[in-house]
């Protein structure tokens, strides 16, 4: 950040801090919001853009080599008149980052002259053209697109510290994408009575990135086709340099026909739920009492201030008053034993979680019962309690799925058949991957390692709507001139100093100076766009 930009940023930060400072304020005889003389005018010369952070994301796509990877691998257009494949893919992802929720919202982007100028584009595809592009995809093309994105993802991972590669945790699950449309091809009714599709998702729990997505009709079981996808992601993690890989899934993904092969690989551990059938229940009941130990779960969070009195819970009172049947957890106990599934040639470790439950109706205890939850693993070292906690952590993938559905709006079906909707899901979910990469590539200076590392973690775990509000929706004045596109920030927020690109300057052939962070002293990141690795970087302090 240049001294002038840094000075202006600090001045804005100090001004807003002074306004928000807690101080004695006299009682007011009027509301705080007093503006009444509001007038709208149309500017002739000055142009502004609400999602000003889109420039940083576009620069990120260049810096990581994503645009190059897409155009080099994906070939759907015979002639590029005027768009390339990367233009279509990023058009859908940028629309979501800029605040669009539907493919129809592309019409707002393409009619925004400032948005086009900010991206250096004469025009962008309209919703109809974007839909036609989705319909060009065959299954092989969708796989090629995901491979291109994962090639870029590997380069992003390569910039992480060595401890990042200690273990990759792959979570796998299916989810339903509902649609009320009557004419979409390959839709079907699920076991829940919902019409739509049933995509399979494999994600990296370390960074909450969606690695691979397979669309299926709504009447397919969750585990169908999971093993070749898992194998593909295992190879991706090995190529990226991860030393160990942990695969997790619920009872639908026990994959007993594949366990021997994965165990023999040597670098793969797995924790899968397994159905509580009568054989496992019998083995669990036959265990001596001393084999069971109480499971004590750690607190969800540490209280940083003084503990506060808990508020009275309203729902339980209503449930008891109306005599509803409720289930209460009384205790949890954990044990383990060896078991060989029918499809396997060796024994594996079964972790059994036994829950004692009390069933009440109103204020009357009807009875108590035990319920068993089983996990199968080839991890012979980790304590049984930690296996249970790791299996429970897999549920965090549900948060990612919820973000892809409700935040990114990627798991939708705006086109007319299974493959075209699959292509749209992949392109739209790229918006989430770009968010994750922007967090992973945040520079961490040794001087402020703790602070920068905490910001990096917060940005990585941030919800999509919060990310867009803090990092994308930054009003900017767009100034073109001197072969530059300048994003002039018009307001300040606390996240601007983390990953916001404040300027781009070409220093010499193949080298671009990206000013991206300042905490006391200016720090510049030189992005080298030559050689095989466009992410090769080094930091300088002027």
Image: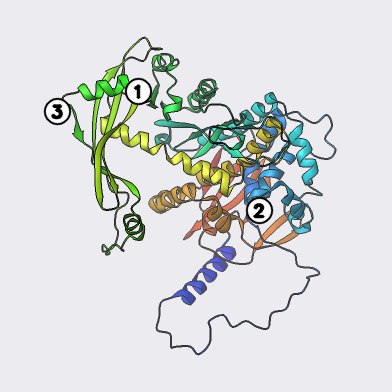
Check contact, mark 1 vs mark 2: CB within 8 A.
no
The front one of 66 and 337 is 337
Q: Secondary structure at mark 2?
A: loop
Give the vertical position of 40 relative to 122 (above or below): below
- Considering the numbered disc 1 on the image, is that residue within a helix, a strand or a loop? loop
Q: Vertically, is 374 above or below 394?
A: above
Which of label 1 and label 2 is nearer to you?
1
Per the model, the C-alpha gap separating discs 1 and 3 is 23 Å
Query: x%, y% of residue 346?
Result: 34, 11
C-alpha separation, residue under disc 1 versus residue under disc 2: 49 Å
Q: Residue furthest bottom?
A: 29
Which residue position holds label 1? Answer: 277
Q: CA distance from mark 3 to mark 2?
A: 58 Å
Task: Identify the element where label 3 is drawn.
Answer: helix
Q: Earlier in the sequence, mark 1 or mark 3?
A: 1
Q: Position of residue 145 (x, y in %)?
A: 66, 31
- Measured as percent of width and height from the top left, residue 220 is found at 57, 26
């Amino acid at each position: 950040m240049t001294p002038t930009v840094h000075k202006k940023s600090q001045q804005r930060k100090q001004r807003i801090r002074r306004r928000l400072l807690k101080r004695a304020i006299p009682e007011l005889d009027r509301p705080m919001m007093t503006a009444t003389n509001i007038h709208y005018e149309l500017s002739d010369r000055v142009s502004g853009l609400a999602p000003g952070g889109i420039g940083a994301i576009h620069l990120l796509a260049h810096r990581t080599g994503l645009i190059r990877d897409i155009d080099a691998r994906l070939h759907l257009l015979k002639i590029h008149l005027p768009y390339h494949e990367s233009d279509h893919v990023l058009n859908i992802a940028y629309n979501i980052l800029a605040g669009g929720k539907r493919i129809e919202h592309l019409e707002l982007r393409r009619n925004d002259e400032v948005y086009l100028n900010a991206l250096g584009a004469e025009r962008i595809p309209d919703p109809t053209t974007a839909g036609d592009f989705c319909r060009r995809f065959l299954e092989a093309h969708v796989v090629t697109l995901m491979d291109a994105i994962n090639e870029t993802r590997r380069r992003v991972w390569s910039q992480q510290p060595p401890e990042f590669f200690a273990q990759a945790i792959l979570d796998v699950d299916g989810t339903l994408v509902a649609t009320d449309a009557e004419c979409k091809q390959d839709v079907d009714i699920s076991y829940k009575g919902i019409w739509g599709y049933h995509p399979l998702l494999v994600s990296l729990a370390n960074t909450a990135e969606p690695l691979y997505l397979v669309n299926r009709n709504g009447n397919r079981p969750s585990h169908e086709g999971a093993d070749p996808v898992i194998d593909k992601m295992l190879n991706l993690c090995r190529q990226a340099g991860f030393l160990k890989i942990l695969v997790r899934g619920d009872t639908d993904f026990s994959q007993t026909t594949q366990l021997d092969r994965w165990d023999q690989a040597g670098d793969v551990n797995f924790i899968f739920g397994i159905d509580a059938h009568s054989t496992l229940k019998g083995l669990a009941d036959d265990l001596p009492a001393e084999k069971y130990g109480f499971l004590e779960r750690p607190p969800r969070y540490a209280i940083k201030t003084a503990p506060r009195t808990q508020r009275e819970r309203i729902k339980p009172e209503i449930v008891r008053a109306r005599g509803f049947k409720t289930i209460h957890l009384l205790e949890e106990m954990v044990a383990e034993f060896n078991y060989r599934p029918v499809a396997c040639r060796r024994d594996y470790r079964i972790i059994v979680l036994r829950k004692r439950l009390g069933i009440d109706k109103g204020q009357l205890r009807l009875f108590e019962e035990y319920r068993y939850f089983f996990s199968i693993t080839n991890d012979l070292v980790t304590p049984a309690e930690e296996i249970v906690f790791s299996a429970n952590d897999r549920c965090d993938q549900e948060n990612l799925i919820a973000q892809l559905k409700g935040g990114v709006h990627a798991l939708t079906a705006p086109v007319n058949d299974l493959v075209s909707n699959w292509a749209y899901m992949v392109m739209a979910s790229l918006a989430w991957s770009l968010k994750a990469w922007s967090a992973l590539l945040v520079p961490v200076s040794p001087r402020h390692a703790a602070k920068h590392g905490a910001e990096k973690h917060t940005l990585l775990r941030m919800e999509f709507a919060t990310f867009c509000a803090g990092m994308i929706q930054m009003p900017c004045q767009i100034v073109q001139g001197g072969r530059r596109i300048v994003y002039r920030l018009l307001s300040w927020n606390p996240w601007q100093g983390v990953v916001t690109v404040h300027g781009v300057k070409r220093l010499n052939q193949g080298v671009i100076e990206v000013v991206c962070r300042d905490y006391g002293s200016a720090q510049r990141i030189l992005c080298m766009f030559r050689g095989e690795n466009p992410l090769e970087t080094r930091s300088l302090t002027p």
